[in-house]
Image (cartoon, rainbow, N blue to C red):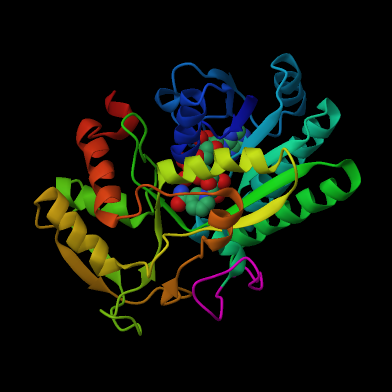
Amino acid sequence: MRVLVTGGAGYIGSVVTEQLINDGHAVVVYDNLVKGHREAIVAGAEFVQGDLLEADKLSRTLKDNRIEAVIHMAASSLVGESCEVPAKYYHNNVVAGLVLLNAMHDCGVKKIVFSSTAATYGEPEAQPIFETALTNPTNPYGESKLAFERAMHWYEQAYALRYASLRYFNAAGASEKCGEDHDPESHIIPITLQAATGKRTHVEIYGDDYPTSDGTCVRDYIHVIDLARAHILALNLVAERSGIYNLGCGGDGYSVRDVIETARRVTGKEIPVRMGARRPGDPAVLIASSDKIKSDLGWQPQFQDLGLIIESAWRWMLAHPNGYGSQ
Ligand SMILES: NC(=O)c1ccc[n+]([C@@H]2O[C@H](COP(=O)([O-])OP(=O)(O)OC[C@H]3O[C@@H](n4cnc5c(N)ncnc54)[C@H](O)[C@@H]3O)[C@@H](O)[C@H]2O)c1
């Protein structure tokens, strides 16, 4: 298939691109490099540097490359920032997203796989979270992703667009070539590993009085290669129909202390920790159920063990001590 990956120079998009190319697909990466890295663009992919808001460039890219499907990863995705600057999130995740949908419509591209987020659910009443749970986002990031999902729904009704929306929490780990290099970094696994290398003085734990086994928040983590495989499986779905799928870790999740202890074991480093206060709006447990995508699409994650996830992230960090800047 000829696939356009928006955000293919970013963390997850680069691994999606890598897996697509390994499977023999032709890939065009479309990225403005505002957050992505030129060095993360996988060999064998075409690269177009452009913004989703550049409608003409986007349409030309779709047409010239005879694109058959889009995997849409490009977005702004910092929850805290979205609360401070909601305008940025509506602009990049909704307005720019609509430019993409309209370009697809104009060019006759009818299939899209969208990297959504489990933040669309807000603070659900029950765990694990199923696709039937109420969507009630508690921040503009989740709200903007949900708005784009609703747009895809209506484009399906009117224009026969077929979409798959994947909702998940925390991507983690690395492939051999592609890893996580965000600035600022907000994810606990790279932050913990940066404390292991001495790049940070410590890891802060935001509260240890939650109603969980060790008092720290419990989250689910999905290996970025397993995530990429789910996006590629979803391409098969949109050949026939649309759907919304959650992706989760498949078990009871891992506490913040589990992450730190596992990172200590994997790295052999002490990793200093400081206790901080709870952050407002952090639920005790957030875990998504993967039952539906397993039964409908046959998703079989291969790296669900936290140790495997952290080992892969650590290998990548040792090989890239300054992220992509060190290549
Ligand atoms: N990282 C996670 O844990 C996580 C969890 C749930 C959902 N997601 C979603 O997955 C997607 C990828 O996340 P990531 O962690 O790889 O993010 P990332 O920031 O590493 O990658 C996003 C890429 O999109 C590009 N981009 C952003 N806006 C653009 C625009 N207007 N035009 C062109 N390119 C643009 C950036 O330059 C970057 O390369 C996002 O949509 C995010 O919301 C991520």
In the foreground, 75 or 67: 67
By secondary structure, the bulk of the magenta-drawn segment is best described as loop
**Residue 76 visible, this angle:** no
User: What's the residue at 26%, 61% (across, down)?
Assistant: 259
Seen from the viewer's position, the closer of residues 225 and 142 is 225
In the rendered image, the vertical position of residue 130 relative to residue 1, given as above or below: below
**Picture quarter with the N terminus:** top right
Position of residue 155 in the picture relative to residue 134 (left or right): right
Looking at this view, name the residue that lies furthest to the right: 158
- Range of magenta residues: 123-138
Is residue 318 inside the magenta stretch? no
> Measured from the top left, where is residue 235 in percent x and y?
63, 38
* Residue 183 rendering spot, x and y as whole percentages: 39, 43
Q: Is residue 106 above or below residue 233?
A: above
Q: Left or right: where does residue 84 sit relative to residue 241?
A: left
Say which quarter of the image contains residue 84. Answer: bottom right
Query: In this rendering, would 317 be left or right of 109?
Result: left
Report the residue at 14% width, 56% height from top: 264
Q: Provide residue 237's location: percent of width, then percent of height.
A: 67, 43
Which residue is at 21% across, 61% downward? 260
The residue shown at (16%, 51%) is 266
Horizontal arrangement in the rendering, residue 52 relative to residue 258 (left or right): right
Q: Is residue 128 above or below residue 269?
A: below
